[in-house]
Image: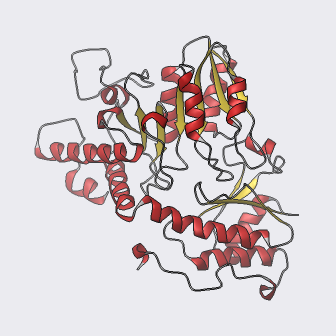
Amino acid sequence: MLHALRDIGAAAGRGIHADARRADAVREGARRGAARIVGAADPRRVALVSGATFGLNVAIHGLVEPGWHVVATAADHNATLRPLKWLADRGVIDLAVVPCDASGLVDPDDVARAWQPATRLLVFSHASNVTGTLQDAAALVGIARVRGAISILDAAQTAGVVPLPSGDGGADVVVAAGHKWLQGPEGVAILFAREGIEPRPLVQGGTGSASNDLRMPADLVDRLEAGTPNLAALAGLSAGIAWVERQGIGALAAHGLGLASACRSGLAALPGVRVLGAGGGEGPPIVGFTVEGYDPADTAVLLEQIAGVQARAGRHCAGLIHRHLPTAAEGSVRLGFGPFNIPDDVRAVIAAVAAILGIPDTDTVDPFPSPTQVPRWQE
């Protein structure tokens, strides 16, 4: 990112001088990496946008037609539910929101039962950002495909730590955040659209191509990337993806899920702590929980004051799922374990929560009774 800002300092697609060509190389390198992550054979079917929320809005507003019936789920993020609700409130679409169970899992049979003759779009999150529960994406996409509908997958919580379904089992549109498991910065995301799925642009303007035509170009990338690219963010995304690929998504997932599983078991052993989700070990390494007698916001503040643990508290921009969990009133506390966390971080969480509850350290169980191997990227 520093190299892009300090040594290139030019806009991609906006010149033929040497630095502009170097900027082009940075952007297209990021695009090729993004295509590998989402399983796209053609990188020109991958647009690089300013964030997953923006990308999901591009997909939703750019595809829906008046009169469509759209199916979404209660486990989804507001990045999809709010644009869908906005369209429904204005009579553009009819919206059905399928419920989830107490772990955040959506039953594909419920999705099939919600289908109507006018259903043309299915939108769902690959994994819940509240509980970490992974959806059966292949089954959900299959329901839409056999019925001739478009599917949009919100992969913000999974890209880079859970393999994304691709090929025949992949969604028609996939949107993934760059700043989470892909180790990139904020302000950049991936939008993949299968050939034949052509979202209308949410923003029109300069693309550096076909400037004599006042209409937006037909090419997906040019059509959806109006405006000056954020070269530093693209460089960061490219570097993050390259790092993830070097380590291997499987190795990163195993490390994070090992920490998350230990944290779940350690917290569940404390009286008064409720751990959310099923914790099956397939989704992202997310741990959601509540502490009896404490508002989640107070718990998060105490975690930082006691042990320097930084957690998110509240409803996590996913208000509907809490109606199906025992967290409707105040939300929950959420932790995410990334590649640079270590077992001592888990011990710190458990010890801090025990301290909040007034439980001595001697009464807690170490979730790592034997030494753990240090991942190669931490050596």
Q: Which residue is more in the foreground, 244 or 314? A: 244
Q: Quadrant of the N terminus?
A: bottom left
* Farthest residue, direction top: 67
Q: Where is residue 360 shown, x and y percent of the image? A: 82, 85
What residue appears at the point 36 percent right and 45 percent down from the top-left corner?
A: 34
Q: Choose top left, top right, bottom left or bottom right for residue 99.
A: top right
Q: Is residue 343 left or right of residue 313?
A: left
Image height of 36 relative to 287, above or below: above
* Farthest residue, direction bottom: 362
Q: Is residue 171 left or right of residue 343?
A: left
What residue appears at the point 44 percent right and 40 percent down from the top-left corner?
A: 166
Q: Choose top left, top right, bottom left or bottom right for residue 256.
A: bottom right
Image height of 256 relative to 72, above or below: below
Q: Where is residue 63 shown, x and y percent of the image? A: 49, 21
Q: Which residue is more in the foreground, 115 or 156? A: 115
Q: Where is residue 342 shown, x and y percent of the image? A: 55, 76
What residue appears at the point 82 percent right and 46 percent down from the top-left corner?
A: 328
Q: Is residue 144 left or right of residue 293?
A: left
Q: Quadrant of the C terminus?
A: bottom left
Number of residue marks = 0
Q: Choose top left, top right, bottom left or bottom right for residue 283.
A: bottom right
Image height of 277 relative to 229, above or below: below
Image height of 341 relative to 315, above or below: below
What residue appears at the point 64 percent right and 31 percent down from the top-left corner?
A: 82
* Farthest residue, direction right: 293
Inspect this view and state whether residue 170 appears: no
Q: Where is residue 213 shown, x and y percent of the image? A: 25, 14
Snapshot colouring: secondary structure
Inspect this view and state whether residue 364 appears: yes
